[in-house]
Image: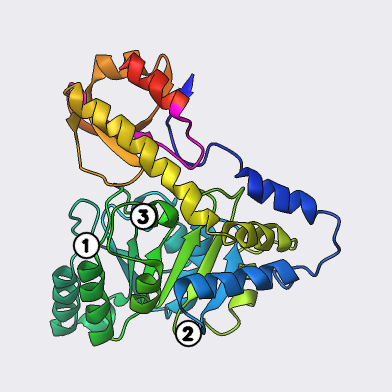
Amino acid sequence: MLYFKNDYSEGAHPKVLEHLLKTNFEKLDGYGEDKYSLLAKEKIRQAAACPDAEIFFISGGTQTNQAVIATMLQRHEGVLSAVTGHVACHEAGAIEYTGHKVITLPQYEGKIKESDIAAFIETFYADESHSHMVYPGMVYISHPTEYGTLYTKDELTKISDTCKKYNIPLFLDGARLGYALAAETDLTLPNIAALTDVFYIGGTKCGALCGEAVVFTKKNAPRHFTTLTKQHGAMLAKGRLLGVQFDALFTDNLYMELSKNAIETAAMLKDTFRKKGYEFFINSPTNQIFIVLENKQMEKIKENVCISYWEKYDENHTVVRFATSWATSKEDVQKLIELL
């Protein structure tokens, strides 16, 4: 079977595994206090051009989203997200489980607009009964979005300015950040650090065995964030596991280099889909490709290829996702092309 179901099916990049093996018998402090975690944090600060960043390594994406949102919000506040946002529909109610509502906004190819953020907040405070309602306390976006689309520098600047106007933090989910940075975009890692209050660099989907690096950009990490992360079950005693991996990923530009493979192999597939007349559901510039397939055609492809059901299109058609990754081989892409 060919595997294009997701971008986290493989283990880790060989250089990450090599670094883990090389350091395996070193006796190191736990909970992210080891020298490799400290080295990785400094390398991330340099890459993000954010020397004062406070950085924490967390075990996975959902744990990161839950810990960041729950610790930054007051008990009466919720988080604004696109209706298609990961926290709104693919995290099993993890945010609501902490007592914080996900307040959904319209999505435009997976993105939200600063005008909708402003309109919601203005309408909220204009309501004389707003003290009986869940307050908007944070804006959550992901880059890339659930549809693989990207914010431009101008779009993120407008959202950032809106958040500053209403004095609420902007949180960027970077579970697939490597693929966003490797695509054709005018939004760089230093831009993201400058325009957000907190973001994270995804490792799980971009070459690591597991782990995400949370970056608080304005000396604004919640008090006792380490303790609170542990309460959320998102801390590893062997914090070295994460620190060593990110140390490898941010050495010699590895994170960017390995992410390019996903973009290159996705481009090969997109070109074939276009030439063969397949219908694109959305134009994604990253590693997630969304195609509308006739249901019988979908079942035929699934005999040889693992792909993701995405959503129902109509009675006879389904939107499916083909995903490439840092490890997708051009040989497997060519085999898929021949099947198509």
251 vs 304: above or below: below
Quarter occupied by the C terminus: top left
Q: Are marks 1 and 2 in contact (CB under 8 Å)?
A: no
Identify the amino acid type marked 1. Answer: Ile
Q: Residues within 10 Å of mark 1 (few under 14, many from 20)?
A: many
Q: Nearer the viewer, residue 74 or 271?
A: 271
324 vs 315: above or below: below
The answer to which image quadrant residue 156 occupies is: bottom left
The magenta-colored residue range is 315-330
Q: Which residue is mark 2?
A: 220
128 vs 22: above or below: below
Numbered disc 3: secondary structure: helix
- Left or right, residue 58 beside residue 48: right
The answer to which image quadrant residue 249 occupies is: bottom right
At 42% from the left and 60% from the top, the residue drawn is 174
How far is mark 1 from mark 3, CA to CA? 17 Å
**Image location of residue 328, percent across then percent down:** 47, 34
How far is mark 1 from mark 2, CA to CA? 24 Å
Identify the amino acid type marked 3. Answer: Ala
**Image location of residue 65, percent across then percent down:** 46, 63
Q: Which residue is mark 3?
A: 180
Earlier-in-chain disc, 1 versus 2: 1
At 52% from the left and 75% from the top, the residue drawn is 45
Earlier-in-chain disc, 3 versus 2: 3
Q: Is residue 94 magenta?
A: no
Q: Nearer the viewer, residue 62 or 25?
A: 25
Q: Residues within 10 Å of mark 3 (few under 14, many from 20)?
A: many
How far is mark 3 from mark 2, CA to CA? 25 Å
